[in-house]
Image: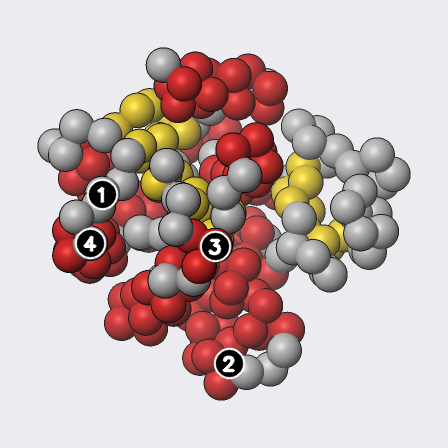
Amino acid sequence: MKIVMLGAPGAGKGTQAQMIAEKYGIPHISTGDIFRYNIKNGTELGMEAKQYMDKGQLVPDELTVRILLDRVAGEDCAQGYVLDGFPRTIPQAEVLTAELDRMNDRIDYAINIDVPDENIVSRMSGRRACTNCGATYHIVYAAPKKEGICDQCGAVLVQRDDDKPETVLNRLKVYHEQTQPLIDYYGSRNVLKTVDGTGSLQQVFKDITAILEG
Ligand code: AMP
């Protein structure tokens, strides 16, 4: 099962992707996590990506595509995967489609988590991420058991630089200009499923599993 998650930044893609990956035993692949891992480890890739991420801009397609194709070629991806944060532009989607076509394969579901813009800014300001394993939380909607501490590894949670209000507005603009067209792209390929992302985490997950098992 190959799944693409769509939706504005802060719509809950990451959390739902994590839950899908766990339930169906497939890898959760987040290009944002791959970039952050590289930034933390001071790699050349990390240094290049950081320049764009800090401004709320997209990392250039060429670099992002190379990383993603490399990751999905991994043996653990043979049975499927859930992509979170990729594709984010039409050219990225076209490269992915072409690569899958080449293997006689395709994306089975593009799950669009729909959340109105007015909810996004407040959602993102409450978001916290683990400094060690990258797990994400929300101080209201998905709070960790102990405030400020990661449930999974016990490390400290912080607000990501790109979740600060000034960057959020730019990310939202970039989303509308470059990523939202993917809704039509996957719609025309008959794999688009839209869920209402304003409900509880559990409700959204229930709606998604109903689609995947329907
Ligand atoms: P995310 O964790 O998915 O919200 O991604 C954080 C940031 O990483 C984004 O704001 C972009 O700067 C960068 N990024 C992640 N995925 C992509 C992608 N597919 N294309 C371009 N930039 C990306």
Camera-nearest label, 2 or 4 = 4
Camera-nearest label, 3 or 1 = 3
Check whether the beta carbons of the residues at disc 3 and disc 4 lie within 8 A of each other: no
The crowding category of the residue bearing disc 4, from other C-alpha atoms within 10 Å (few below 14, some 14 to 19, many at least 20), is few
Q: How many numbered marks does the figure carry?
A: 4
Instruction: Please tell me whether residue 68 is drawn above or below residue 172 in the rendered image.
Output: below
- Image quadrant holding the N terminus, namely top left
Kindly give the residue lying farthest to the bottom in the view shown.
44
* Residue topped by disc 4: 103
Instruction: Please tell me whether residue 213 is drawn above or below residue 126 in the rendered image.
Output: above
Check whether the beta carbons of the residues at disc 2 and disc 3 lie within 8 A of each other: no
Q: Position of residue 82 (x, y in %)?
A: 43, 43
What amino acid type is highlighted by mark number 3? Answer: Asp
> Which residue does the image show at 28% across and 34% down from the upper left?
108
* Residue topped by disc 3: 76
The crowding category of the residue bearing disc 1, from other C-alpha atoms within 10 Å (few below 14, some 14 to 19, many at least 20), is some
Mark 2 or mark 1: whose residue is earlier in sequence: 2
Inspect this view and state whether residue 139 appears: yes
* Helix, strand or loop at mark 4: loop
* Residue topped by disc 2: 47
Relative to the observer, which residue lies in front, 45 or 128? 45
* Residue topped by disc 1: 106
- Image quadrant holding the C terminus, namely top left
Mark 3 or mark 4: whose residue is earlier in sequence: 3
Residue 1 is left or right of residue 168, and the answer is left
What amino acid type is highlighted by mark number 2? Answer: Met
Q: In whole angstroms, how far apart are the C-alphas of marks 2 and 1?
A: 32 Å
Check whether the beta carbons of the residues at disc 2 and disc 1 lie within 8 A of each other: no
Residue 153 is left or right of residue 117, and the answer is right
Residue 68 is left or right of residue 37, and the answer is left
